Structure formats: structure tokens, C-alpha cells
């Protein structure tokens, strides 16, 4: 329903994110990018870091029109997405693989010839 945000936290947070993105797009993109770098993959990480990284991917995917030019996509494919998809924890892999698939779907029109082979590798990994 149109007013789901009145009763549920997730739609309310998404509505707030949308407003913040429209008002503070550059500032928010920089902040989310820095936050993502702080919670990048590490051995023995906890679920909280995985969920925070998932939220960063959600924020960047929701604002890809504004933030895509600021994101070093090839670097992210190698440094974030591939590491996340090779996560040793099955639970963490399931959380991150769904979000990465969604994020690639949002950014598919912006995939360049240089990044296409890595995107294909990611898609193959997602289908395993």
C-alpha cells in the first residue's frame, strides 16, 4: 500500500533514504562509499558488518542514477563483489549474493566492455 511506511520500519527507512538522496545526493554518496570501505570483507567478520555492507549496497543501488559516476565500478567488482561472493559463511553469502544480483540489475545499463567479463564471472558464481 502507499502508506506502508506508516506501519513498517523498512518502507519508512527506504522513504527516508529516497528523500535524503534527492536533497543530499553527493554528500550521501560519499558517506555511503566511505562506510562501505570501512566494512569491507574481512576474515571472521560478524553478521552486523555483513548487514551494514548489504545496506550500503542497497543505498548505492537505490541512488545509482546520482552516484554511479562517483563509484569506481571495476574496482568494486574486484574488491567488494567477488570477495563477498566467495564468503566462507553460507548465511553471509546468501545475504550478499541477493543484494549483489539486485545491484548489478540496477547498474546493468552502465556496464562497460571492460567490466563485462567480471560481471559474467559474478553471474556465473551467483548461478552455482
Image (cartoon, grey):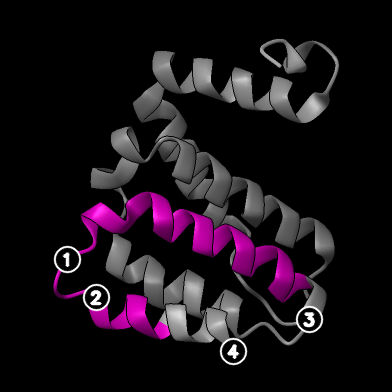
Q: Which tag, 4 or 2, sits closer to the chain's start? A: 2
Magenta-drawn segment: 92-121
- Disc 3 crowd, CA 10 A, few/some/many (<14, 14-19, 20+): few
Q: Which tag, 4 or 1, sits closer to the chain's start? A: 1
Which residue is label 4 attached to? Answer: 128
Mark 1–mark 2 Cα distance, whole angstroms, equals: 6 Å
What residue lies at 54% left-to-right and 51% top-to-bottom? 57
State whether residue 37 appears in this view.
no
Residue 121 placed where, x, y %?
39, 85
State whether residue 44 appears in this view.
yes
Mark 4–mark 1 Cα distance, whole angstroms, equals: 24 Å
Q: Which residue is more in the foreground, 32 or 21?
A: 21
Q: Which tag, 3 or 2, sits closer to the chain's start? A: 3
What residue lies at 66% left-to-right and 12% top-to-bottom? 2
User: Up-down: is 89 above or below 8?
Assistant: below
Mark 4–mark 2 Cα distance, whole angstroms, equals: 19 Å
Q: Which mark is residue 116?
A: 2
| 102 relative to 74 in the view: left or right | right
Which residue is label 3 attached to? Answer: 90
Q: Which mark is residue 112?
A: 1
Do the numbered discs 3 and 1 sit on residues whose CB atoms are within 8 Å?
no
To which quarter of the image does residue 16 belong?
A: top right
Residue 4 in magenta stretch? no
Pair 4/1: label in front:
4
Pair 4/2: label in front:
4
Look at the numbered disc 2 and give the secondary structure of its residue. helix
Look at the numbered disc 3 and give the secondary structure of its residue. helix
Q: Which tag, 3 or 1, sits closer to the chain's start? A: 3
Mark 3–mark 2 Cα distance, whole angstroms, equals: 26 Å
Amino acid at each position: 500500500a502507499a502508506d506502508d511506511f506508516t506501519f513498517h520500519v523498512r518502507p519508512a527507512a527506504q522513504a527516508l533514504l529516497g528523500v535524503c538522496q534527492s536533497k543530499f545526493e553527493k554528500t550521501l554518496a560519499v558517506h555511503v562509499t566511505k562506510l562501505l570501505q570501512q566494512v569491507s570483507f574481512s576474515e571472521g567478520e560478524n553478521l552486523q558488518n555483513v548487514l551494514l555492507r548489504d545496506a550500503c549496497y542497497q543505498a548505492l543501488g537505490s541512488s545509482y542514477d546520482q552516484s554511479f559516476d562517483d563509484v569506481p565500478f571495476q574496482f568494486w567488482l574486484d574488491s567488494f563483489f567477488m570477495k563477498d561472493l566467495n564468503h566462507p559463511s553460507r548465511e553471509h553469502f546468501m545475504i550478499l549474493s541477493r543484494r549483489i544480483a539486485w545491484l548489478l540489475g540496477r547498474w546493468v545499463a552502465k556496464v562497460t566492455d571492460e567490466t563485462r567479463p567480471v560481471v559474467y564471472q559474478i553471474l556465473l558464481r551467483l548461478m552455482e
